[in-house]
Amino acid sequence: MKNLYHLLQQADLNRLKESEEYEPDSLVLDGFIHLAYKEQLPFILQQFFVPALLKSGLLSEGEGLQNVGLYLVEIAFAKLTAKVVDELAVGLNKLDSLELYPHLYGGLNREAILTISALHINAQGDYLISAL
């Protein structure tokens, strides 16, 4: 099975580092943790993160890659202790994607985390991964 990915911001990164089992707000609100396959990351960044970061002023218009406090967690599917289900994306306003996205129904156990990297992105959703 392919590795999975989870995007998070600084406050959630701190929570992740402090716990043996990471449980973001989405686990309570949606009942699962939002994950992605690597090829899905550009769409997710453009659809969910870029608009919010532009609105908050953390990301500015233009093509230059910027550090906005966004992080990428790479996860080994085989080491997860909670169930993963591929389902339609939650929160899309239009049918931009009928792809299935992985959702983790339970906490993210520390043993499944392979890497945590910083993302540098631009307003078009292009990104560069850099080691922490």
Image (cartoon, rainbow, N blue to C red):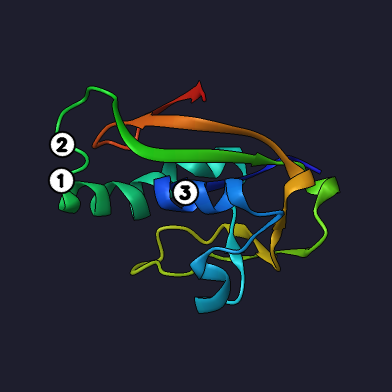
- Residue 31 location (% of width, % of height): 60, 76
- Residue 131 location (% of width, % of height): 53, 22
Q: Which residue is under mark 1?
A: 57
Kindly indicate the quadrant of the structure image that contains residue 107: bottom right
Task: Work out whether mark 1 precedes mark 3 in sequence or the reverse, and give the earlier one.
Answer: 3
Q: Amino acid at mark 3?
A: Leu
Q: Secondary structure at mark 1?
A: loop
In this rendering, the answer to whether 113 lies above or below 103 is: above
Q: Which residue is under mark 2?
A: 60
Q: Secondary structure at mark 3?
A: strand
Residue 36 visible in rendering = no
- Residue 115 location (% of width, % of height): 65, 32
- Neighbours of disc 1 within 10 Å: few (<14), some (14-19), many (20+): few
In this rendering, the answer to whether 88 lies above or below 39 is: below
In this rendering, the answer to whether 43 lies above or below 115 is: below
Task: Work out whether mark 3 precedes mark 2 in sequence or the reverse, and give the earlier one.
Answer: 3
Q: How many marks?
A: 3
Residue beneath the point at 34% across and 50% down: 49
Q: Amino acid at mark 2?
A: Ser
Q: Secondary structure at mark 2?
A: loop
Marks 3 and 2 in Cβ contact (< 8 Å): no
Q: CA distance from mark 1 to mark 3?
A: 17 Å
- Residue 44 location (% of width, % of height): 44, 49
Residue beneath the point at 53% across and 30% down: 117
Q: Amino acid at mark 1?
A: Gly
Q: CA distance from mark 3 to mark 2?
A: 19 Å
- Neighbours of disc 3 within 10 Å: few (<14), some (14-19), many (20+): some
User: Which mark is drawn over residue 8?
Assistant: 3
Marks 1 and 2 in Cβ contact (< 8 Å): yes
Residue beneath the point at 53% across and 44% down: 40
Residue 44 visible in rendering = yes
Question: Which label lies toward us, 1 or 2?
Answer: 1
